[in-house]
Amino acid sequence: MAEPDRSVQQNGGPMRLVIATCTVDYAGRLSAHLPLAKRLLMVKADGSVSVHSDGQAYKPLNWMSIPCELRAGPDQWVVTNPKGETLTISIEVVHLDIEHEMGDEPGLRKDGVEAHLQELLAARPEAIAAGLKLVRREYPTDIGPVDLLCRDAEGRAVAIEIKRRGEIDGVEQLVRYLERLDLDGRLRPVRGVFVAQVIKPQAQVLAAARGIGCVEVDYDELRGLDTGRLTLF
Amino acid sequence: MAEPDRSVQQNGGPMRLVIATCTVDYAGRLSAHLPLAKRLLMVKADGSVSVHSDGQAYKPLNWMSIPCELRAGPDQWVVTNPKGETLTISIEVVHLDIEHEMGDEPGLRKDGVEAHLQELLAARPEAIAAGLKLVRREYPTDIGPVDLLCRDAEGRAVAIEIKRRGEIDGVEQLVRYLERLDLDGRLRPVRGVFVAQVIKPQAQVLAAARGIGCVEVDYDELRGLDTGRLTLF
DNA sequence: ACGTTGAGATTGCCG
DNA sequence: CGGCAATGTCAACGT
């Protein structure tokens, strides 16, 4: 064959959607077989292939992840990967076959648990320590905003740093904020509390050495309390 | 409204495929946002919704699993589930919108690793222990067949039980076989070896207490050796 | 019905 | 760069 083999799907192409009556066989980590039925075959731009039925949201019945190579003949598709795993799709009838250029995917932005934690704790600072009242979220200092500034039951200032995972650099960050806040006569002396879902032993030790309190909070419980409040009224 | 709300997707409908320029927001366990881009929206017969880009095989960018309810307006889809999680798809442009009746899915048949392991080890019992020679696969006893019966280098009988995962009940099963096999003067005394990809500590302890050997085998390696043999000739 | 466990997991994070 | 843990884990099986 002199001309390039167009049956080989390379990365960067459009998404291809095929609805076909087919059987599917996978041989790799395990062997699996799908009897003859109508299914959706999805070939993504990156070359990966997945076989969907109209159930089992969202997981496909079978698939082949990149890196892999698709040899798509009229009656049979064979997808192989470097590990020697194969996905063989034997096609009886094609009901639909479309290609669509999808363009770039800007990517998923997960609004981290940290932001949400801050929201929840701003709404209920007493979950950190009894009697704590919020002064301001994102209280500004000249080296950046501290997550929460509160006053305790005795009216003393408390700076709170919130992390998803409590590690040593989070404690150091809080120490820097505390230095800055202590320059303000209206706040001084400012106590620090480091809050996270889990605080690593190293961070706990450093915090203790710096006179900073540590509080581990349960995210689900906080969310539960929060929704609990919402549903009460 | 007197007529039924057709914008509500119930289970049992056809599969719907939409390619649309859209933004997507998920609020539930976490919050996530997808900027405006062209994506594939898949609505399965069971009502589940998933949002695919043309990368990240096979996992969708966002999804909502059953049980859930889809309210599909022209500009916005809102999928909710009983836990109060929401998936909101705001549609700018629709590039494709098809529905297709998929019919029944006969279901996936997984040919277990255990059967394949037995095949591979029957072909190469020396992978279990040097000098081991196969007498018979599925050697019958009156309480069921033992996976492999072998003879070691000294001609002594060895009964082998093969599991994908070595747990305590697999050891007990082998113990029962050994009792039976020991009744046969032509075999007695019969040694036992428990073979699995991984053997749990509890099972190892019990095996040791019963004088049964434990061998962990690497499935991929065995397959490799096997295909190695096949490709050598 | 509920808890336990495995999964062709994938993905991020840490050391 | 390789091992470990989390995942919006899900799904299947045993109690």
Image (tube, coloured by chain):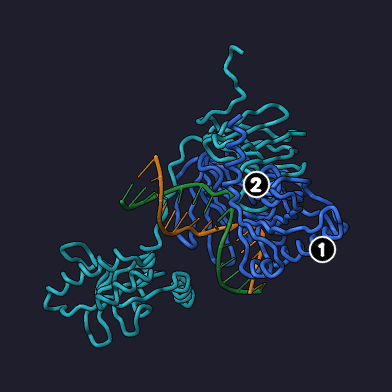
Chain colours: A blue, B cyan, C orange, D green
Residue placed under numbered mark 1 in the picture: A179
Give the answer, above or below, for where D15 lies relative to B147: above
Which of the 4 image quarters holds residue A134? top right
- Work out whether mark 1 precedes mark 2 in sequence or the reverse, and give the earlier one: 2
Q: Identify which amino acid the numbered label 2 is placed on.
A: Glu
Is there a contact, CB below 8 Å, between mark 1 and mark 2? no
Tell me the residue at 67%/65% (across/down). Answer: A167
Which residue in the structure is indicated by mark 2?
A: A126
**Between B32 and A146, the one nearer to me in the picture:** A146
**What residue lies at 57% left-to-right and 53% top-to-bottom?**
A77
The N terminus of chain A is located in which quarter? bottom right
Where in the figure is residue A36, as x and y percent of width and height?
46, 44
Do the residues marked 1 and 2 share a common chain?
yes
Q: Amino acid at mark 1?
A: Glu
User: Looking at the image, which residue is at 57% across and 42% down?
Assistant: A224
- Say what secondary structure mark 1 lies in: helix
Compared with A159, B185 (above or below) is below
Q: Position of residue B125 (x, y in %)?
A: 34, 77
Q: Residue furthest top?
A: B2
Q: CA distance from mark 1 to mark 2?
A: 24 Å
Task: Judge left or right: residue B93 versus residue A78.
Answer: right
Question: Where is residue B158 shown, x and y percent of the image?
Answer: 25, 78
Chain name for mark 2: A
Q: Name the residue rendered at 20%, 78% in the picture.
A: B190
Query: In the picture provided, is B68 more to the left or to the right than B76?
Result: left
Q: Nearer the viewer, residue A216 or A35?
A: A216
Taking the image as drawn, is residue A228 in sight? yes
Taking the view exactly as shown, the residue that stands out farthest to the bottom is: B154
